[in-house]
Amino acid sequence: MIIVGERINGTRSRVKQAIMAREADFVEEEAQQQAEAGADYIDVNAGTGPDREADDLVWLARTVQAGVSTPVCLDSPNVEALRAGLEACTGKAMLNSASAEEGRMQAVLELAHRHGARVIGLTMDDAGLPKTAEQRIAIAQKLVAKAEEIGIDRDDIFLDPLARAVAVENEQGAAFLDAVSGIRQSLPGVHVICGLSNISFQMPARRLLNRTFLAMAMAQGLDAAILDPLDGGLMAAVCAGRVLLGQDDMCMGYIEAHRAGRLAEWS
Ligand code: THG
C-alpha cells in the first residue's frame, strides 16, 4: 500500500491559517509527523482562491521538501497551480489530479509526462461524477488509453474511482468496490487509489467506516490511499490488511509495527 498523507489541506482551518501567515514551522511539522507515521507521499492542497493558489501551492511544496525527503503529491483542480508546483519539486512528484474532463485530461497528463511525475486520474468526465462501477471503469479505460498515448508508464498511473458518501447514496460503497476490482482486472499494472474519508461523510463514528472500508477496498485491489496517517487505527488496519493479503513477506512489517508499539491497542 502506498500511503498519501492528507493532512496539509487548506480545508482544515489550522492549515489555512498557516498558509495565510506563511507559518513554515507548522507545515514542516505536519509533514514530518506524517512521514514518520508511514506516509510515502505528502499531499499538499492549498484550497485557496484561483488568484493565489499557484503561489500557495509552490510555498507548500517548498516548505514540505525543506522538512522531509518524502515526495510531494500536488493536489489542485487548477492546471496552472499544478504546473507551478511541479517546477518547485525536486524528486518524483505525484499530480493530484487529472480527470477525463475536456481541458484537464490532456493538459495534466502531458505535464506529468514532461516532468516524469506520477499522476492520479479521477474517474470523472464532463458528465460529472459517475454512479455505477461500469461508468467508472469506462472512464478509467479512457484515461489510461490517453496516458499511454502520451507515453506515461502504467506504474505511474493511479486511478481514483471516487468514493462517495454512503450517507447520501447507500449503494455507493458497493459501486466503488466493484469499480476497484473491475479496474484491477481490465487494466493490469495501474494503481488504484482513493480519498478514504469521503465514504463516511455525514456519518457518526467516521473512523470506523473509514477503517472498515479500507480493508474491504484492499481486498478488491486498492493499493494506495489518501488518508490521515496519524489515525493509528487506520494505519494498523493497513498493516493487518497487508499480512492477510500476502503482501507482507514473512509478516515482518506487521511484527516490526508490533515491536514499535504501533499495534499495542489490539494486543
Ligand atoms: N481523491 C483525490 N484527492 C483528494 C480527495 C479524493 N484530495 C482531497 C480529499 N479527497 C482528501 N484529503 C482530505 C484532507 C483533509 C480532510 C479530508 C480529506 C479532513 N477532513 C476533516 C474531516 O473529515 O473531519 C474536515 C475538514 C474540516 O472541515 O476541518 O481533514 O477523494 N485524488
Image (cartoon, rainbow, N blue to C red):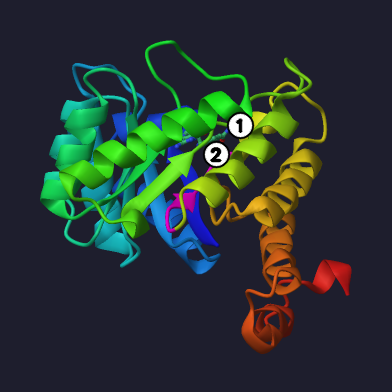
Q: At which x and y percent is residue 106?
A: 20, 30
- The circle on residue 195 is 2
Report the residue at 44% width, 23% height from top: 124
Report the residue at 79% width, 21% height from top: 170
Report the residue at 82% width, 35% height from top: 205
Q: Is residue 153 visible?
A: yes
Q: How many marks?
A: 2
Q: Which secondary structure lies at badge 2?
A: loop
Q: Quadrant of residue 69?
A: bottom left
Q: At which x and y percent is residue 105?
A: 26, 28
The image shows residue 32, relative to residue 199, as above or below, that is below
Q: Which residue is mark 1?
A: 163
Which quadrant is home to the N terminus?
A: bottom right
- On whether residue 190 falls in the magenta region, the answer is yes
Part of the protein shown in magenta: 189-195
Asked whether disc 2 touches disc 1, contact meaning CB atoms under 8 Å apart, the reply is yes
Q: Which secondary structure lies at badge 1?
A: loop
Q: At which x and y percent is residue 10?
A: 41, 30
| First of labels 2, 1 by sequence position | 1
Does any atom of ligand 1 lie closer than 8 Å to the CB of label 2? yes
Choose between 79 and 152: the one closer to the eye. Answer: 152
Does any atom of ligand 1 lie closer than 8 Å to the CB of label 1? yes
Q: Amino acid at mark 1?
A: Ala
Within 10 Å of the Cα at label 1, are there few (<14), some (14-19), or many (20+) other Cα atoms? many
Q: At which x and y percent is residue 83?
A: 15, 36
Q: Quadrant of residue 53?
A: top left
Choose between 246 and 44: the one closer to the eye. Answer: 246
